[in-house]
Amino acid sequence: MKQDANHSAEQEASARLLGALLDGELSEAARDVTEARVRENPDDAARLAHYQAQNQALHALFPLPAPAPALLLQRRPSWRQRAWIGVGGMAAGLLLGFGLFASDWTGLGEPAFARRADMAYAVYAPEARHPVEVAASDQAHLVSWLSRRLGRPLTVPSFAEYGYTLVGGRLLPGDAGPAAQFMYQSGSGERLTLYVTVFDHRDVNPQSLQGEGRRTFYWADHGMGYALSGPGEERALSEIAQDACYALGGRPDSWKEEVKS
């Protein structure tokens, strides 16, 4: 029992230290020591990556407004404070959503699956140790499993000509059922995700939305919604998304129109 208590205390102290590192609250000397510890300890590195992913997701979901001039010197909220703010905002958003947006549309001009795909990229792309549930080495099982869960036959397009190889995939909750996310990675470590879900409302011509340091191209046809998310230059990502659309049986003429951002 004493060993368990000591282990729990060590984990709590480690969490506080990593949170302080993420929030920029450590002195230069303490930061150097903590960063060295993270490099040498895989568990701490994984925990820090998890905190970073949470921070990015919360920032994307609940961006902080610009402070008033008189408040510029106040300390910015930490990721923990933003988490509590986010929980309250999410609860309020759910209540508003049930009353105003009881559909598959966000009210912001794009289908809800596009925002879900963008957020899923922000959460899982930074993951160092657990980016996917099923690795590409078991691709046949991955595709069969996700096809069964979505109730539609899925295919995984290849982006090898762009330097991206399949990492694997995972099952995610969608708006009205399950969704699938396939992740790809380049030799330099950049990642793309392809989000797939059933969307049988109407076809959606290719469009895009932009987050902090990322962009998502989305479209829908033949009862399915697709979204390709990634970092980098817009034109290059648009070209990959267009090839993905072709590979998945989309309409080539839909890409002749200007992609709106």
Image (cartoon, grey):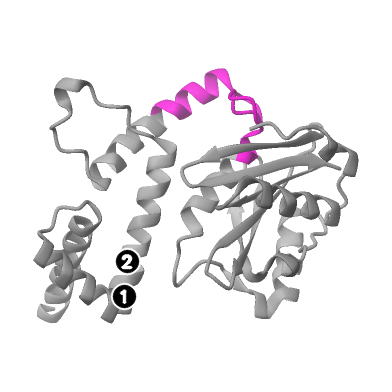
**Quarter of the figure with residue 19:** bottom left
Q: Position of residue 5 (x, y in %)?
A: 13, 73
Q: Position of residue 257 (x, y in %)?
A: 81, 32
Mark 2, Cα crowd under 10 Å, few <14 / some 14-19 / many 20+, is some
Query: Does 109 appear in magenta?
Result: yes
For residue 242, the mark is: none
Residue at position x 31%, y 75% in the image:
43
Residue at position x 27%, y 47% in the image:
79
**Which residue bears the numbered disc 2?**
47
Left/right placement of residue 255 relative to residue 145 reads right
Of residue 132 and residue 232, the one placed in the foreground of this image is: 232
Left/right placement of residue 239 relative to residue 216 reads right
User: Helix, strand or loop at disc 2?
Assistant: helix
**Which residue bears the numbered disc 1?**
43
Q: Is residue 165 above or below residue 228?
A: below
- Distance CA(mark 2)–CA(mark 1): 6 Å
Q: Quadrant of the N terminus?
A: bottom left
Q: Give the residues drawn in magenta, as a range.
A: 92-114
Q: Position of residue 200 (x, y in %)?
A: 80, 37
Query: Does 40 appear in magenta?
Result: no
**Quarter of the figure with residue 210:** top right
Label 1 is placed on what type of residue?
Asp
Q: Position of residue 103 (x, y in %)?
A: 65, 27
Label 2 is placed on what type of residue?
Arg
Q: Is residue 62 above or below residue 230?
A: above
Residue at position x 50%, y 41% in the image:
211
Q: Are marks 2 and 1 in contact (CB under 8 Å)?
A: yes
